[in-house]
Image (cartoon, helix red, strand yellow):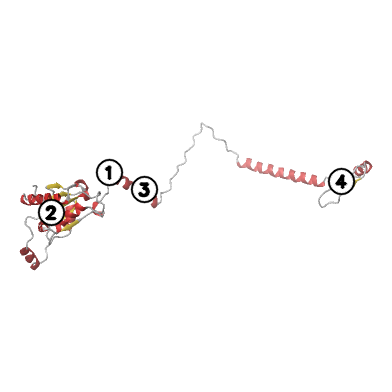
Amino acid sequence: MLKVAWVKSRKPSFTLNSFEDLKVFFKKGGFSFANRSGSHQARHGNHQNAESGEELFKKAMEGVRPISRGDHVERILQVGLPKSSKNIDDADVLKKLKDLVKHGKGFNISETPEYIEGTGYHVHPSVAKRLHQGEYSIQADIDLHGLRVDDAKELFENFLKWAITMGKRGVLIVHGRGLSSPTEPILKKKVIEWLTRGPWRKWVVAYSSARKCDGGAGATYVLLRKRPVSKRLKIRRRNSPPNHFSPPSTLPPG
């Protein structure tokens, strides 16, 4: 017995019990292909729409020809967008850093914690700054770097006695930066102490850290007086109008 079942969603099912029923079924018209023909028409309509779109494209491209290798193509100028200010600032800082590391450009000793300066009695502070900037000639120098404190003090005192006797006004004392000291630069601190607290303070006009070419923070410029400050001079200055001492910008050669 032959049973053929045709099932379609939302459609009634058909059951054929024999070949005779199948023949009768086909004689009555068989399956309906309405849906299939409808889908064919839809596809055909889409094909027509695609063809109409292609025709529109062809009309739009009328007169246009492809570019061959021999044709000259004009280059389009590309204008770069301006860099942001942050990128410019970063590049400028990086350049300055390279110049500082490679050539020492832009390094200002007076802006570092190692910089020192001071002035003697009745002397304007600007004199120390001018001394650091190289406005006063340096006529003699001494190197105390690496010596013990006692030996350095003896050599320091002998040097200043000689400089004053010989009429030297600008001198350079090299003491080092004290980088090997565990706490602070001992010899550098002692030199400043001898210039400001000892008997030599009467002879000091001003002092400041040297420029990089003369040792930087590891050396000190000292400007000396022709005559020491006395009590009589202090009394006279105290009773007279303020007139800060300002030595000439250049000193005679030694």
| Residue carrying label 2 | 223
Q: Secondary structure at mark 2?
A: strand
Q: Is residue 250 visible?
A: no
Q: What's under tag 1, amino acid-wise? A: His
Q: Residue at x 7, y 49 (%)?
A: 162
Q: CA distance from mark 2 to mark 4?
A: 122 Å
Q: Percent from the top left, x then y, of residue 203?
A: 10, 56
Q: Percent from the top left, x then y, of residue 250?
A: 12, 51
Q: Secondary structure at mark 4?
A: strand
Answer whether labels 1 and 3 touch (C-beta < 8 Å).
no
First in sequence: mark 4 vs mark 1: 4
Identify the disc placed on residue 5: 4
Q: Nearer the viewer, residue 133 or 35?
A: 133
| Residue carrying label 1 | 103
**Foreground mark, 2 or 1?**
2
Q: Residue at x 13, y 53 (%)?
A: 223
| Residue carrying label 3 | 91
Q: What's under tag 4, amino acid-wise? A: Ala
Q: Alpha-carbon neighbours of circle 1 within 10 Å: few (<14), some, or many (≥20)?
A: few
Q: Secondary structure at mark 3?
A: helix
Q: Residue at x 66, y 44 (%)?
A: 53
**Foreground mark, 1 or 3?**
1
Q: Is residue 28 above or below residue 186?
A: above
Q: What's under tag 3, amino acid-wise? A: Ala
Q: Quadrant of the N terminus?
A: top right
First in sequence: mark 2 vs mark 1: 1
Q: Alpha-carbon neighbours of circle 3 within 10 Å: few (<14), some, or many (≥20)?
A: few
First in sequence: mark 2 vs mark 3: 3
Answer whether labels 2 and 3 touch (C-beta < 8 Å).
no
Q: What's under tag 2, amino acid-wise? A: Leu
Q: Is residue 235 visible?
A: yes
**Foreground mark, 2 or 4?**
2
